[in-house]
Image: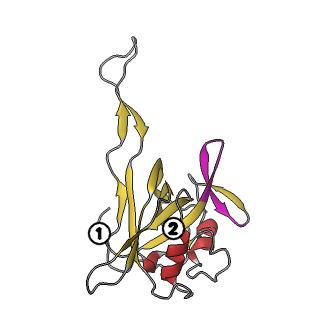
Amino acid sequence: MSKVLPGYETLLLCPAIEVDGVPWLVTPTGLVDFSAPTAAALNVWQAINKPSDLYAANGGNISCAVLDDLNLGMTGSDTDSAKNICSKGSTEALTNYNFNAELNARYDEDIDADSLANLFRDLTRAPDVAYFIVHRVRGQKDSTQTFAIGDEVDLYYVHTDNPTIGYGDEEFLTIGQAFIPKGVVNVGYTLAA
């Protein structure tokens, strides 16, 4: 991921479910194809930024909770170079998209506070929860601005792992989540609806 101007990134955790082995974005009104997400579907989760918000138990806008040391983006993908007897020359077939998805956030000292930090904690507190991480970095849009037609987004399908608490002398507590990449991405998608 290339650096962008500070303050102009949006990160959503959108709930996901697999149907016949294919992941889908989940919204309160139904399922949305991850290969063609809509602004309306993303805006459901963009508006959620504290545990008391409606549907906050399922996903939300974690942008301002995440520290700027995130490790999110594509890495070298796996290929298969096996040939059949009719293959001419060298062939390679893509077998798996690889990416990193590691996020850290501040840990709220008040575990009952209705805070963005506690939303991040709540959404990432247990392993094996399926999400699409939606990342909007292009254009100068604040994380509080809704998604619109023409916005470019990256989607990464992940499952949560056990979170880790970080602490050091004279430092704020943090909570870290090294998501488990599931090899499904939609990078550089421009919202068309």
Q: Secondary structure at mark 2?
A: loop
- Residue 44 is left or right of residue 106, and the answer is right
Q: Residue at x 42, y 40 (%)?
A: 96
- Quarter holding the C terminus? bottom right
Instruction: Please state which amino acid type lies under the numbered disc 1.
Output: Lys
Q: Residue at x 37, y 81 (%)?
A: 173
In the image, farthest residue toward the left: 169
Q: Which mark is residue 46?
A: none
Q: Residue at x 46, y 84 (%)?
A: 108
Crowding at dot 2, Cα within 10 Å, few <14 / some 14-19 / many 20+, comes out as many
Nearer to us in this view, 7 or 120: 120
Viewer-nearest of discs 2 and 1: 2
Q: Earlier in the sequence, mark 2 or mark 1?
A: 1
Can see residue 103? Answer: yes
Nearer to us in this view, 65 or 92: 65
Residue 74 screen position, x and y as percent: 36, 53
Q: CA distance from mark 2 to mark 1?
A: 25 Å
